[in-house]
């Protein structure tokens, strides 16, 4: 029997929606999975160990990267939130993870970027991974930051990053937009696995979607990752369309990749009211 | 059971070769199909109603668009013909249909454009949908006009258009060129269906071909339509090649997407002789 | 002394704003200038002859092209007008002129296309001449048609066309948009002269602007015409800015090349009220 | 006499090398110039007012944007420094300035970005402004962040930004790299002036160099800013070349736009030693 | 039963690794296969004839092309060797074959080019067939020469060439690089067959790889050849990875398409020691 | 007074049309100019030394590169000639020169490539330096070879090459094609000087033309060479046009960059008659 590919992988955001899927999905790839999250994880499996800390805690974050072969960084704020939350969880937090990788000699990072890093591009533009950033909120802005951070750490320090722009990873497509943006949980695991095991990553960006019939972006530049999606929204299509009204094709939220995020105002405006 | 996606669809050119296929193919998509053609349609089905008129008749054409949810515009002249026929059937006729859509609030048009709108581009160029028009005759010129008309009505009036550049839609591939240009009738129905039901169309151009092994154009920019062809010419290949001579690779009709249309002279030259 | 480059040039729209400039500007290039317009021209010069007719009159239009070496086609409707006017003056009219060129062996046409053929593209896009058509009205749509007509007559019949997309050719820049869109009368003459005398034109598209500091489009693909503008709006800038308010940068009319044309409704809507 | 274009402009980093030049250069454009810097400014002119604060102070930064028509944001850390300095001065600081613009209705920001946002691209690539970010250090990373921030505030809030990627703005070119990267002080003033007064900016990126003979990047996409450089390094060339050795053409610092920045290690490594 | 597609095909390099596969694979396509090689072929089949000569022998090479319908040119030096060997076998040899095609009226050549014609391009660049040559040795340089020769003979003499850039065609993928570069023998036969039978080839370049999950180049521009690979390295992946160490992602041999060829010195350096 | 930039430059083809100009033009750049040619040079100047040999003589060619700082390689066959002449003078000859550079540590080569390396591209394509080779004869084919050789020696051995695609360098433009293709002798000297002194060359390709009004190619990718042409054909235009007939715009020799070279047959056909 072959030994697992990695000795120890650090998974941040392990208690989150996708983190939970990845605990299961990454298990075959490593001897031990180190789970990191602000929330406590109570159902620890034999192949798992846990670290409970805030990504804004530089020392804890760097410490969590000791002794690992690869980092799957899905932690931080996952929605549009206040600037302080974004700054601490995503900007400072991601910096701490990359500093950990650098200081502890970790060679590859798989990062959960997001469609919201490019949310203002339109479907009709059919962008590829070289299109400029167009974040659709502070959340997306922090994803842009972490992508650029990954590129810097590759160019300067030789640490590889696969930045996976997750579109919509949920159990099922919940609305019409998800008919094209959906990433099934199984395909999410396939994508992270491909990113961890690809022969050469350097700094790469991949769009994280299943093999849906409707394809609004061009994933050609991620071809070297070897991600081959297996799922599609076609089997959900009739039901989703029946229960949701036809969208207004001239609405920005319909034309733009980011969907309704482009209609959000500033997250701190409520607090200032 | 789900209600059909549309209440009433207008199908122009309903008595033509493709119109006949679409009567069958579109039936599941709508409660009622309004068939329009200059020729009378005698085998009207229960889900169908007919309008017999010339597209050059502005009032009749606009009237035919009343009360419909979508228009599948396959009517007009389908071959290289005299300027007067092209002008009336395709240029004026298409304008009348779009004016009908605008005046009657129809939200989406699926238009039968043609490879002959880009017939002078070469296979070796592997163009995508952003390549400039290069019509190969008056027929193709009228297709270019209607594409631009559709773009205008989207940009200015918010009416969506999917312009489908039909390559060669026949029962079987009839010559060597059709080994790459063929669109099976079933794939034609799939393409029109995708164009009618895609979540976001705006103004889009798709190349209408089956999944033939030989692919001389790049359909990437139609990815958001969700068209997935299922047929291929490979099963016809041996027979077609056996009965047709090897072409001269330096001939314009072989190098250009438009095929023998590029060798045609002016359609009115005979009349002037 | 050298003989003039051409024996006889046909200038359509000779009584119009630019036609008047071109009568003066083209005089040195030919022995005789044939002026065509619907309006009578009363100040005929010794080197000029006049033809008074409507471009919709096919026979008259074709007749006007007999015995000429080149055609400078600036005639037709020059503003957003009713569909009937556009159809007759620009679509049918341009077809008549090209048929004249074909039937009478005229080798080159210089055509007054317009920024309104691409009016919905944005300044920020920095398009070049290969960008798809995006007309901003029926007027622009007719310019797209005539461009495609020119391309067809080059590809099929070997008649060269330089399509000059005139931006704003007026005595002086009248508003802030014209600070970048202005084409001085002298540069207009230079541009038409270059298009007439370039060694190889084929089918070419050039953006017609002076050498203004603000450059929103890329004229690289017209480099073989040899047009070198000499004027600039910089000397008018302070005055224009002082007398016109700062524009709203999010307005479509400010973002799009077509300016306020993009805000126009359908020209026939008034007549139907 | 014409009133100045702006009533009040906020200039951050006013005590810095370029800030000093801009005090002089922007004076004719506004009635009053508000100078902001951490350092006290002692030679205040009649048309100037001063605000002394740290950009990391959110309240002070937002307050400084009250009552201004435009912001010229040249403040923050100007070299590779510790993460804490970069985070506070450039990431948090720039966010504060943009929040000030948003909360106080300022319509346009001119931002001093840097070649170090794209420092790992090579001269041989001849990138344009659409090339992806490739920062060459934490300083460059913070410039990438502020560019994305500007794009977000344009897309979502309609605040225009011209991000000027300053290459090397010094009194004279000091080494061989500056023979192509130099931006004279006068051209720097011209560039900022163009960015402030361009009719339409949206979110734009310009490369800030003089009209040097050696041109390693393509500034076409900033054409709508109307920046026309007047200076060149040619007059300094012989002297610079005579006093500096020939570079190794295979060295990364010679091949990359960022120069010796690409050879720098992590700025915090010394502190940790 | 249908007659074979070709009467006689000339296969050069028939005794080599791929030549042996092609003897089997091309048999169904022609009545007779003419085998050429410097080495004697002893197991001649009934449908085969042999010519034993050195490609550097112009007269013999031209003679071998008499009476053939198509040439599959896989002969010459297949590795980095001395300049003299490359010059004679590949540069002069390929010229002789093309001269044979021209003098004897052969209409199509299928040429075994190589990844080493573009070996210094990086996986991350995702080049297509229009990318400039970047040979990684004298062997690759000779492949570039023969590609340009093929283009010339198409442009000037109308002889079609499909240049197939073979990546790694071996019985099984032997190392990690081959996990993406592998071309199975069956897919090699499919590719050559497609190139021989495609309706229109002109001068085309195809990347010769199987349908491996990891795809570092873009084969879109060979779409008109109709090559549909059927094999993949996925079934070999676990074994290959288990027996080979993880590569250094910053090594040129890992980043570049050419693999370890980019690390080779000059082949004649040993001889000069 | 400053010492000259180079100690010794080797100039091959020194007795040729351009070599003669470069003897004068390069004199200020070096202490000594080593002239190489097959023809004897009789008017040797004090700063010059001569080597008389055939480039096909490997030992002599390599010997000529000893002790030089840079090579300006303008030698070899300068017209379409027999394969043997091209093979020996240009293919083998250029290889010998590059081997000399490698073995003797010369760091930069300026190579006289030619428009005939890309002669089948059309003016209308407006190619840049990344366009694929399309040689228009054996001469052009050998230029393609030497360009690829230069790229290899840069990628593998770190020897820089500027490949200058000379268009038409003659005392005056002699025909209509030269109105756009002309490179004045002074601009030729400027171009070689720029290529020798540019701060970073790597492997670069430049189009060698003066600043003629008609510009059919895009020289943007040579921007880092710092070549600024000063001459133009405009002053010759009237005379050239008056004495030469109007060309047929559909002729290949008019449409293609290579001019009448595209109409030449095979140079050895005469010898075989």
Image (spheres, coloured by chain):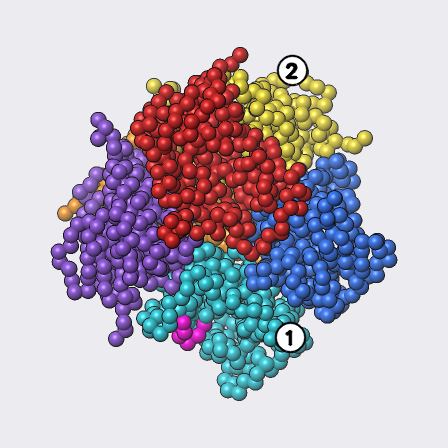
Chain colours: A blue, B yellow, C orange, D cyan, E red, F purple
Q: Which residue is mark 2?
A: B42
Residue D272 circle label: 1
**Residue B223, can we see it?**
no
Task: Specify the farthest residue to the top.
Answer: E1
Q: Position of residue E204 (x, y in %)?
A: 45, 35
Q: Residues within 10 Å of mark 2 (few under 14, many from 20)?
A: few
Q: Residues within 10 Å of mark 1 (few under 14, many from 20)?
A: few
User: Residue sitting at 30 percent across and 45 percent down?
Assistant: F92
Which chain contains the residue that carries disc 1? D
User: Residue sitting at 54 percent across and 55 percent down?
Assistant: E251
Side of A118 where B114 appears, left or right: left
Of badges 1 and 2, nearer the viewer stands 1
Q: Quadrant of the N terminus of chain D?
A: bottom left
Q: CA distance from mark 1 to mark 2?
A: 88 Å
Q: Position of residue C91 (x, y in %)?
A: 44, 35
User: Residue sitting at 58 percent across and 41 percent down?
Assistant: E174
Which chain contains the residue that carries disc 2? B
Looking at the rendering, which quadrant does residue B197 occupy? top right
The answer to whether residue D43 is above or below residue A124 is: below
């Amino acid at each position: 029997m072959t030994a697992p590919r990695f000795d120890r992988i650090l998974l941040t955001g392990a208690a989150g929606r996708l983190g939970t899927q990845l605990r299961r999905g990454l298990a075959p790839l490593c001897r031990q999975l180190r789970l990191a999250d602000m929330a406590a994880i109570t159902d620890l499996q034999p192949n798992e160990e846990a670290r409970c800390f805030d990504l804004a805690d530089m020392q804890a974050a760097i410490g969590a990267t000791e002794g690992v072969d690869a980092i799957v960084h899905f932690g931080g704020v996952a929605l549009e939130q206040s600037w302080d939350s974004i700054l601490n969880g995503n900007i400072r937090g991601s910096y701490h993870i990359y500093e950990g990788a650098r200081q502890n000699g970790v060679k590859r990072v798989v990062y959960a970027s997001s469609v919201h890093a490019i949310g203002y591009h339109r479907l009709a533009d059919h962008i590829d991974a070289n299109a400029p950033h167009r974040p659709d909120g502070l959340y997306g802005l922090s994803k842009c930051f972490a992508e650029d951070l990954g590129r810097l750490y590759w160019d300067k320090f030789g640490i590889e990053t696969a930045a996976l722009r997750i579109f919509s990873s949920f159990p099922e497509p919940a609305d019409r937009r998800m008919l094209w943006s959906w990433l099934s949980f199984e395909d999410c695991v396939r994508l992270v696995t491909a990113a961890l095991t690809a022969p050469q990553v350097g700094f790469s960006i991949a769009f994280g979607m299943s093999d849906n019939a409707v394809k609004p972006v061009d994933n050609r530049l991620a071809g070297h990752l070897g991600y081959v999606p297996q799922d599609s929204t076609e089997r959900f299509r009739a039901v989703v369309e029946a229960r949701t009204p036809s969208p207004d094709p001239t609405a920005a939220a319909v034309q733009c990749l980011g969907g309704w995020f482009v209609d959000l105002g500033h997250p701190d405006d409520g607090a200032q009211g």
